[in-house]
Image (spheres, coloured by chain):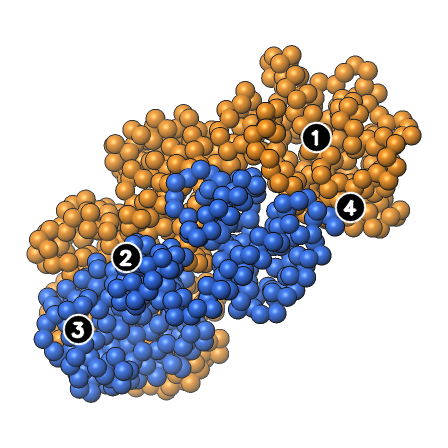
Chain colours: A orange, B blue
Amino acid sequence: MATQALYRKWRSRTFDEVIGQEHVTRTLQNALATDRVVHAYLFTGPRGTGKTTTARLLAKAVNCVGDTDVKPCGECSICRAVDEGRLMDMIEIDAASNRGIDEIRDLREKVGFRPGEARIKFYIIDEVHMLTDPAFNALLKTLEEPPPHVIFVLATTEPHKIPATIISRCQRFDFRRIPLSEITRWLTHIADAEGLAVEPEALEYIARQSSGSMRDAISLLDQLTAYGSDTITLAQVQAVLGAVTPQSVMELADSLIDGDLARGLDVINQAIGDGAEPRQFTREFVEYLRGLLLLKMGDGAGLLRASVPDETLARMKEQVPRLSPRTLLRATRLFNEAALEMKVGFLPQLPLELAFVEAVMDETAAESPVATTPSAPAQKQPVTPVIPPTPSAPPSPTKGPSPTKGLAPAAEVSPPQPPAPPASPTPAGDLTFDVVESHWQDILTRLRQTNKMVEALMRSVRLVAVDGNSIIVEAPSDLLKGRIEQPGSKSHVEQCIDQVIGVPARLRCVMKGEYRPRPQPAATPAVEVAQDDQTRKEDAESDSAPDGPKENNPGALDPDEDPMLQEALNLGAKVKNVE
Amino acid sequence: MERPIIGHEWAVDLLLKGLTIGRVSHATLIVGPPNIGKATIARVFAQALNCTGEAPVPCGECVSCRKVISGNHPDVRVLDAPGQSLKIDEVRGLQRELSLSPHESRWRVVVLCEFERATAEAANALLKTLEEPPAQVVLILTATEADVLLPTIVSRCQVLSLRPLPVTLVKEALVSRWGADPVQAELLARLSGGRLGWAVRALEDEELLARRDEHLGDLASLMSKGRVDRLAYAAGLSRDPESAKGALALWLGWWRDVLLLASGSRVPVTNVDQGAMLHQQAEQVTLRQAQRMVAQLQSTIRNLDQNVNLRLALEVLLLSLPSVDGNIGR
């Protein structure tokens, strides 16, 4: 005979044993005491929080014939029959396998008959979200006005799938996730009663892994008893779950902070080689990052103390100052996405690796907006890419002199104005991101009147920033970029902008994801200007991208090609005449 | 006696030990990447449950074991239909069958392979059975990942999450059990990513390696070709969806290697036999390019699962493949 799984054996037998759902049990008990039990209930909530259990308890309580004050007594014939699953008048329906209208019609026919041995005929319709629409509708009348000897309990994990007409006929109770401490307490109780020796840390770890579901927690405990050894240790739990050592997590965080790609990848693969489950690793790392985030954003220490060991907390505190909030946020987001990545192929660690690489590379890119350092060409000769070279390549974490202000997201701040020379014909102040953005539709409309081709092109790009008098747009592919940069279309757009906004502007097209805002001019303008010039030169170089369209006439001076001219334009000059 | 399963000792021990001490979980979910040995473990466990031979179970020689191995055991049902979804009617049929007691042995065992094949209705229909099955019933589910199943399903099972085997173990097994040549075994073990099942299949299917060489060669040569050639190649490849998917998986492994090398990490690469070529490419491309390529390959593979147009997806992918001579414009 099979031993019953612990989660079945330890199904709560009284309302007091239903853990963490006092708001439900107290209400039900009061209803029982004052004889105000209604004819239809809807129990909703996440898995393993006690819906079916409470439904069965209620079935016992309304029918209990024991002479105790607190119902159910658990002793009388009815209570025992329910516990053993043999009470004829408690009908538990698996709505997921009996989901059609025929089953409901059958139910309606039988509802009329009086109960056999108990006072009340008790229907539990479990997984009720799987009923078909006609089945739900067939149930409506019965649910609203059943015979006096009938009580319905509908239970589901997915209340959003239940029609409003059903919900409005029921008293609804929402079960909550069970708090960590309560699960731990109950697990300790079970372990004691079953005579299992379990380390307290192991129990707490199990409780944390179960994310508020009692069944998950007990299941896991059950599984560990099969080891049959004397004591269940934390190490065993972690081995079964494919858990990660805190050291690997901390080391990965260090590598992220230092921007050390090679080390981070080593850490990941080492941990996986040692038996860590990649998704579990990702989740734990997200958890860790969240901890860092809480610390960074204020006094998170209090919140974390309950769930994080002191040792880890100390390490976190040491790491926090080395991280900018923006980096932290971006990393958390990236790893969270990786944790949610549904499909893993034969390389389960790939999403994690990729998230890490991306987080580090964005970091180095954001920290050194000055593109490739002057020594770069000697360093590594990147092949001509389909995607033009990124201004961010150096894998080493070049902690540039750039101020952290520059890290603010491009969309939020209106881009910095370069210090315009006094000779500038147009005051640069006239052209800001907001102005351009508000006129963007007008510009497109005007383009449409004159050249539909160009308008279509412009509709496929996204306005990202305005820098001085350059309007920067992002193209999703180099093909589009090439088309936009053709002198004809480009000047056409510029003309239109001039007409609409009244300020002569230059259009610059970059590849998607490549635009980085320049550092804000800081307190020492002299240095900043010098640096700005550097950036500009780099920009100019990257503008004359390798696959840009060549001018037919080799003698002509193409404003797009000449770095000198480019720089002059950036400083506010205007092209008068191209010969 | 030879162990019935290579590797995964902890999982097998957990199951068999539970059997010896009389704690058999009524529902077990085995998860892990494809071809790692989930179904194998499930079958061995089914054998062990009903084995009548001498300990250690499964003996593999008693009548019951032999019936399970040949697939004739009346109380052991294996539902395995790769690629087809598991419908609610099958689950209902199963429920009827399970309500009867076993014909001749201790346990009625049902192995539901690749449970992610189950439709939402079928999965929900199994919930109640999975939670409280009739006595003497053991359900074994397998899936690539716990997260692709309903959380309510997972929560009712004891979950065993299989991990890739160490490369050396796969290699040894290939040499000792399947009599592979050590050099080839090493390569296959690496390529398999710790999935013995795949390695064995590759060993038996000689074309597999030839196809791999071909696809990798194509990838390298495409990098020095222009748009026209790339589009033509995409069109050709899209005619055979199966081989296209194989090629994408290969390329993903390849570019991950490039990324690893370019980052300077010490993690061993997968394509060991192509070290020189890998190093060369790692020199040629920037880290960012490698990262983009991996990300793009991954998203292409994901998109294909969601029924995007294969040819379009391949075209987009190949157009963004870095170019070595800069003649993409042509």
- What amino acid is at disc 3? Pro
Frontmost of labels 4 and 2 is 2
Q: CA distance from mark 4 to mark 3?
A: 69 Å
Q: Mark 2 belongs to which subunit? A: B
Identify the residue under disc 3.
B58
Question: How far from the left and from the top, in percent, is residue B116?
Answer: 40, 68
- The image position of residue A449, as x and y in percent, is 88, 48
Parent chain of label 3: B
Secondary element at image label 4: helix
> From where the camera sits, is residue A336 visible?
no
Structural distance between the alpha carbons of marks 4 and 1? 19 Å
Query: What is the x, y in percent for residue B205?
Result: 42, 70
- The disc placed on residue A541 is 1
**For this rendering, which residue is in front, A565 or B194?**
B194
Q: Is residue A576 left or right of residue A55?
A: right
At label 2, counting other C-alpha atoms closer than 10 Å, the crowd grade (few under 14, some 14-19, many 20 or more) is some
Seen at 15% across and 81% down, the residue is: B62
Label 1 element class: helix
**Cβ–Cβ under 8 Å for marks 2 and 1:** no
